[in-house]
Amino acid sequence: MTFGAKRFGRRLLLSALLLCVWAVVAWGAARFLIVDTPLNRADVIVVLSGSAVYKERTQRAAEYYRQGLAERVLLTNDNLRGEWSSAEQRNPFFYERARDNLLRLGVPAERVEVLPQPVSNTYDEAQALKEYAVANRLRSLLVVTSAYHSRRALWTLSQVFAGTGIEIGLQSVETGEQTPAPLTWWLHLSGWQMVGGEYVKNVYYRAFR
């Protein structure tokens, strides 16, 4: 084997080792963002707004409703519109699409409620949920959100609901349908937006919220 071939082989081996190390680090970074605090029973299931991932969140919420974990499903409203609907001849709001998806999945219309006030971020959602929960004398909420959003969502909800006596459960949705998996998120642009973006937002929330 020539010197050039040996050097190429060493570089190839080093590149493979670095790739393996990066894959492990990237997997760990993604897994760190995922938390769960399940409840066996709650007064209401809450689906946090997530324009690009409303399908996976509402699907999980519908599963919990069918399992009897709560008798109602509550949606927050981020006031954003989705793609054009030829059937409706307009761009429906994402909360409307989320509600429609819940109905398709078997949740009765009278069991689905939408918070009327628009929210623009997770902190706004937590504040709106607190006002709703206090006004309706709720004792527990089971919150459904996407995997990489779960740590920041739980931290925010815990801060906002502190001292209320209202129990907060949070269930993250498994990755794979609309959210890249922890092992491969870095191969997708959306993965960098979700995982990388969440680290930036987590730092911001802890520093300024």
Image (tube, grey):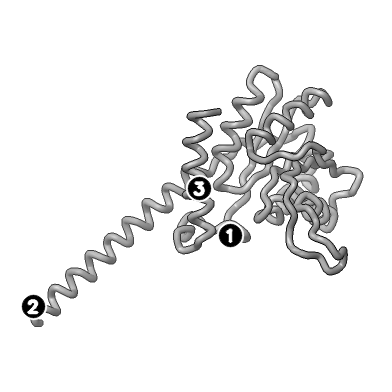
Side (left or right) of 115 relative to 177: right
Q: Name the residue under label 3.
A: 197
Q: Quadrant of residue 41?
A: top right
Towards the viewer: 98 or 104? 98
Q: Give coordinates of residue 165: x percent, y percent.
A: 69, 19
N-term-proximal mark, 2 vs 1? 2
Q: In which quarter of the image is residue 128?
A: top right
Circle 2: element type? helix
The residue sitting at the bottom extreme is 1
User: x, y percentage for residue 113?
Assistant: 84, 41
Q: Which of 115 and 86 is in front in this view?
A: 86
Secondary element type, mark 1: loop
Reply above or below: 37 against 139. Answer: below
Residue at figure coordinates x 67%, y 32% from the top left: 126
Q: Tell me if mark 3 has few (under 14), some (14-19) or many (20+) residues whose alpha carbon lies within 10 angstroms of its own.
A: some
Which amino acid is tagged 1? Gly
Q: Distance between the residues labelled 2 and 3?
A: 44 Å
Name the residue tied to disc 1.
Answer: 176
Numbered disc total: 3
Do labels 2 and 1 touch, CB within 8 Å? no
How far is disc 2 from disc 1 in space, using C-alphas? Answer: 45 Å
> In the rendered view, does 76 fall on the left or right side of 3?
right
Q: Which mark is residue 8?
A: none
Q: At which x and y percent is residue 18? A: 28, 60
Quadrant the C terminus occupies? top right
Numbered disc in front, either 2 or 1: 2
Q: What residue type is labelled 2?
A: Phe
Q: In the rendered image, which quarter contains the N terminus?
A: bottom left
The residue that disc 2 covers is 3
Give the foreground label among 2 and 3: 3
